[in-house]
Image (spheres, helix red, strand yellow):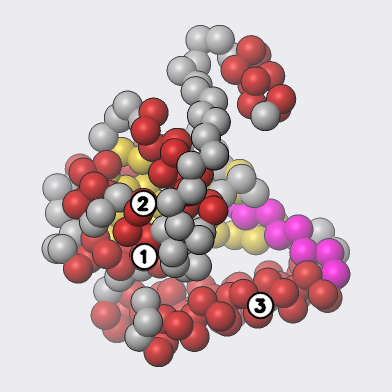
Amino acid sequence: MSVVKQIIADFPHVDISLVISDRTIGTNLKVSNLANAVTQAKYPFLVLADSDISVGSDYLQQVIQPMQQESVGVVTCLYRPVVRGWVAILEAVGIATEYHTGVLVARKLEGMKFALGPTIAIRKTVLEAIGGFTAIADYLADDFQLGYLPTQIGYQVVLSEYIINHAIATESLTDLIQRQTRWNFCTSFLVLGDI
């Protein structure tokens, strides 16, 4: 919290709000945080971004650009792993050879019907139309849902041409196994149809 307060103090000309709430709407605590923060959102587009990404100054302009078409409800991005250490390199190889390949093949075969966690831009009206964050509050794969549910009501998900940098901080084999276990847990539910 002190870091956010310092950012607010360092950039007084930027409209920044610190939202503090202990309200929980489901089992996914990140989604509860988003639900609490969205109460302060003032604009028609929301951009959700992981804290371990880095982007250029043109990021928002590029990510929001597809929203000029009213049929686009969600925009998401692939990412370039930024690594340090051999365990993180192993994870980056998996991302490049399995994860990205899976995303691109899915897009080619059936279109984008999901979003990717490191960046999700969504229209506020689309979020409201799917039931808000409450609709995904009990899902582990909330990023998937933020893309999937809008497609079920007729909106498109666009995979942006913008590639973000994503810091891979995995330092031990135990961390890598835990992350892969979580990822496999998410994808096994998606494959089995309990999405």
Disc 2, SS: helix
Q: Which residue is mark 2?
A: 133
Residue 166 is a magenta residue? yes
Q: Position of residue 1 (x, y in %)?
A: 67, 29
Q: Amino acid at mark 3?
A: Gln
Q: Which mark is residue 145?
A: 1
Magenta region: which residues?
Answer: 164-172
Q: Amino acid at mark 2?
A: Phe
Circle 1 or circle 2, nearest the eye? 2
Specify the quadrant that holds the C terminus: bottom left
Identified at 52% across, 35% down, the residue is 21
Q: Is residue 44 above or below residue 109?
A: above
Q: Position of residue 162 (x, y in %)?
A: 44, 51
Q: Amino acid at mark 1?
A: Gln
The answer to which of marks 2 and 3 sits earlier in the sequence is: 2
Q: Residue furthest bottom?
A: 192
Q: Nearer the viewer, residue 89 or 135?
A: 135
